[in-house]
Image (cartoon, rainbow, N blue to C red):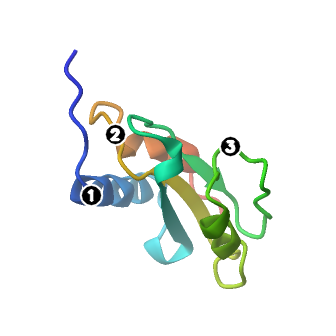
Amino acid sequence: MRHMPMTEDEVDVECAGALADAGLPAKRVRFYRLAELGPGHVGAGWFRPHVTIYHADPAFPDDAQRAVANQPGNRELHRLTVPAAPGDRAPGGRARASELGPHRP
């Protein structure tokens, strides 16, 4: 099986698609692209609004971005971590909709 890395534009499209699939408006979500998730990583992490993201959480290994995610204004949002360079289009960003699940107010 040949792996086809996704471009940044493709990641943007897939993230927007995941929001649409989950029924969440973009203004209620912030995506964090993390190089620390490693090349070829296709998973994602979802953090509910108002939940503190702790240092030990493997889905959010970037200290600086985690601090930003925990600040007022971001804490009120759904926060999703995605690989900065997903290594395969097959699972892609739409799989991230499973991280969001059906939208609940």
| Residue 88 vertical position relative to residue 19 in the rendered view, above or below | above
Separation (CA) of disc 2 from disc 1: 12 Å
Q: Name the residue under label 2.
A: 92
Task: Tell me the SS state at disc 1.
Answer: helix
Q: Name the residue under label 1.
A: 8
Separation (CA) of disc 1 from disc 3: 23 Å
- Residue type, label 3: Pro
Work out whether residue 2 or residue 101 is closer to the camera in this orientation and state it: 2
The residue at 47%/47% (across/down) is 97
The residue at 63%/46% (across/down) is 59
The residue at 59%/48% (across/down) is 45
| Residue 64 vertical position relative to residue 46 in the rendered view, above or below | below
The residue at 37%/46% (across/down) is 93
- Ranked by sequence position, the earlier of labels 2 and 1 is 1
- Residue type, label 2: Gly
- Residue 67, picture quadrant: bottom right
- Ranked by sequence position, the earlier of labels 2 and 3 is 3
Q: For the residues carrying marks 2 and 3, which lies nearer the camera in this image? A: 3
Q: Name the residue under label 3.
A: 58
